[in-house]
Amino acid sequence: MKKQQKKSKEQNRLICIVMLAVILLCPVFSYASFSDIEGYWGEEVILNWTNKGLAKGYNDGTFRPKNEITRAEFMSLINNAFGFTEEVDIDFKDVLEGKWYLSTIKKSKAAGYINGYEDGTIRPDKLITREEVASIIAKMTNLNQYEEGSKMFKDQERMKWSRGYIGAVANEKYMAGYPDGNFKPLNNITRGEAIFALDNIINKAGIQIIAKQDFLGITYIHVIWNKESQPLKVIANGNELKFDKDDGKWKGTSLYLNIGDEVEITAIGNGMEYRKTVFVKDIAD
């Protein structure tokens, strides 16, 4: 697979939704079901993610959806889920060589969604709050701050610096409040809440990619962008494809692919990038 080219910080803030394995809190095994999620409000989403290999449970058969996560753990989840791979040098005082999250924080810094604190620290082992997550999601998805949206929550006065971010993600329905009408910005986010928020982003994009090949060896890439429109550009294994208005598909006549081959797709447009690896199928399938 070809190495991705480097992008600017601004580009890295755009969505790069890719269905990669998500590592959450050092989980160890995947399960079709878990002993501790029956009746949990996010049960369906958790099962969907684990069945697709996007999240894992623990070796005792639990998922622990109510466990809180640290800032470094959330960064790791973000980088894997959204395909942030570029790294930059960092000089945070509390990130030492040999720590598991060294590479994670380098990627997060390069992606532009995390900057650290004024005292020169990043506090990787600190539990991450819901308002911090709202801020990261807003920056990642290139949302403008929208304070008006935070007025729907009873505890808006507790949002000292985060009203615009919380209002923006709530307006986009990436994050929601609690049944009591509060957002609880200072609460630490849980595994279940984190997966649910990221799942909302993926579902809102609503992008599907299918690669098929006819008997002449022409590979057709069918891209459904936001469920109703087409992207501005589609690249397959580094080759820019041409859009055929007649059948609504992107065609690559010189991709030199066979049925069953792996192809890396990048779809670009409307301030978004979507990357996904698919396998070429027979046109008859």
Image: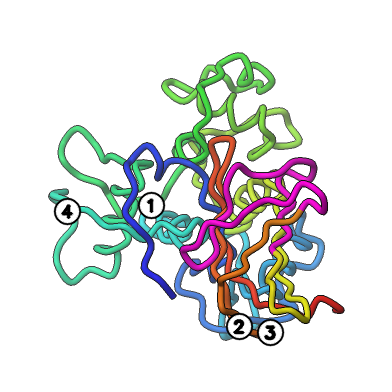
Query: In which quadrant is the N terminus drawn?
Result: bottom left
Tell me the SS state at disc 2: loop
Q: Which kind of residue does numbered mark 2 sit on?
A: Asp
Where disc 1 sits, the SS reads helix
- Dot in front, 2 or 1: 2
Q: Are marks 2 and 1 in contact (CB under 8 Å)?
A: no
Say above or below: 125 vs 26.
Answer: above
Of label 1 and label 3, which has the lower sequence position? 1
Query: Which of the labelled discs sits on residue 117, or is there none?
Result: none
Residue 207 falls left or right of residue 136: right
> Disc 2 versus disc 1: distance between alpha carbons?
38 Å
Residue topped by disc 2: 261
Front residue of this view, candidates 262 and 36: 262
Query: Quadrant where the C terminus lies?
Result: bottom right
Residue 71 — which label? 1
Q: Which residue is mark 4?
A: 89
From this view, report whether residue 187 is shown above or below residue 94: above
From the top left corner, tell me how far across and down residue 6 is, in percent. 31, 54
Query: What are the residue bounds of the magenta stretch?
Result: 221-248
Residue drawn where x is 55% and y is 16% of the image: 147
**To which quarter of the image does residue 96 belong?**
bottom left
